[in-house]
Amino acid sequence: MKKAALHNLGCKVNSYETEAMQEMLEKLGYEIVPFEKKADVYLINTCSVTNMADRKSRQMLHRAKKQNPDALVIAAGCYVQSAGESLLQDLAVDILIGNNEKARLPEILKEWDKSRAASYIHDMTHEKQYEDISLGKIPGHTRACVKIQDGCDQFCTYCIIPYTRGRVRSRQIADILAEAETLAENGCQEIVLTGIHLDSYGTDLSGENLLTVIGTIAGLDGIQRIRLGSLEPRIMTEAFVHELASEKKLCPHFHLSLQSGCDATLRRMNRKYDTQEFRACCERLRACFDHPALTTDVMVGFPGETEEEFAQTRKFLEELQFYEMHVFKYSRRKGTRADRMEGQVAEQVKTRRSDVLLKMTEAQSRAYRRRLVGGTVEVLMEEACEKDGRLYQVGHTKEYVKTAVASNISLANRLVNVKVEKLLENDMLCGVLTDVDRK
């Protein structure tokens, strides 16, 4: 039996596509092995969001060929779109698969056996067809991502994605429903809706939007939870938030992409909102949901960011009190407007600002968890772990807070109610089982 190894770089959409391609290889009879093992085929689903991502993609491709010079090395995804010409000259890479071609993996492998055709890349800038790639099962998992949208029309000044992923393309409701039904039949109870720009779902369709998808999946037996991927604040109108709050299966966990708490910086980024609009969005969610978990992305060191602008961001974040913040330093990306901007911030300044916000998010996250102590939470159990000689069953609440109960009995893929007694040293909630809810 031939062996295949896969490696994923980048976002949840990339991860979803990598798992789908793994399923394709399994159906072709390949045994899937860890990437560090010798394999007949290595497939790297690449990322190109920053220059560093490009470099990591190249490194993984060369590492694969070094592990087995006779192996077939396949590069797929965004880095292939952005650097296809140079990769054609790279002796470490045998096949290039661009975006919107990944579903053709089985066909591409057959063509390689016949003709050694190496390149499957086309211009994404005018692509209008959604690539129907899907998952059938997630072995051992209680939660699964379902990709419903691809592409982006926003053109933020720091981002290459509209050029590597193309414009907005939405998946047909019938195909989304079919995948969710299959996942439910295989025991998955929680669906995470994901996409490159999730809010844009349906803008290229007639009469459908994100609420349509949520309502359709909520009607499925077996699906107990629906979680949303990253969202832009502009989608959170009064009417939209009230519609979300009416769906009991929707998890009160919202990732709202902020990037900066300074209006001047947001304008240079070409973000389509200001801090006042973002604040109003958070207030609406907190008014309609009971203690929702609000998380965000924050970029430090964007070109031109002064100490005063950073201070505005810090103050804004202190006021909003997020459950978690993903803090990252601006990284230049060739081909974007931000790469050509004046006022590039020194690396040591970026690091100092990042450290300030990382300390802030640690404190805010711990404070959010502490507020849950003493109450009862619903937990979807996922796995067992051992700590200090005791066996714990571990899962996540609807708000995506990790929670444990001491139990020698496996509760995997069970919905249980837990009375929270304390916060462990690793910020995990810990409590006692009160009852098994559904299933």
Image (cartoon, rainbow, N blue to C red):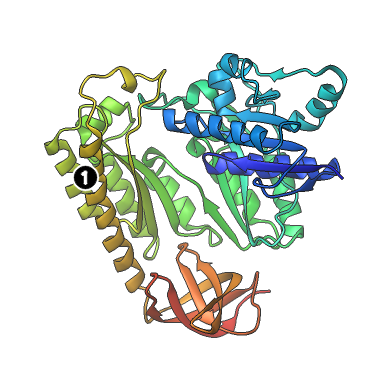
Where disc 1 sits, the SS reads helix
Instruction: Locate residue 39: give its quadrant.
Output: top right
Q: Amino acid at mark 1?
A: Arg
Residue at the image point whose x is 35% and y is 59% from the top = 323
Which quarter of the rendered picture does the N terminus lie within? top right
Q: Residues within 10 Å of mark 1 (few under 14, many from 20)?
A: few
Horizontal side of 71 relative to 154 (left or right) equals: right
Horizontal side of 385 relative to 102 (left or right) equals: left
Residue 50 appears in the picture as rendered: no
What percent of the width, then of the height, locates residue 347? 25, 35
What percent of the width, then of the height, locates residue 329? 32, 39
Which quarter of the rendered picture does the C terminus lie within? bottom right
Residue closer to the observer: 214 or 428: 428
Residue closer to the observer: 53 or 59: 59
Residue at the image point whose x is 36% and y is 65% from the top = 291
What percent of the width, then of the height, locates residue 41? 75, 36
Residue closer to the observer: 99 or 437: 99
As displayed, is residue 258 above or below residue 86? below
**Residue denoted by label 1:** 352
As displayed, is residue 311 above or below residue 409? above
Residue 239 appears in the picture as rendered: yes
Count of numbered circles on the image: 1
Residue at the image point whose x is 48% and y is 53% from the top = 244
What percent of the width, then of the height, locates residue 385? 56, 74
* Furthest-left residue in this view: 308
As displayed, is residue 151 above or below residue 358? above
Horizontal side of 16 relative to 69 (left or right) equals: left
As displayed, is residue 255 above or below residue 45? below
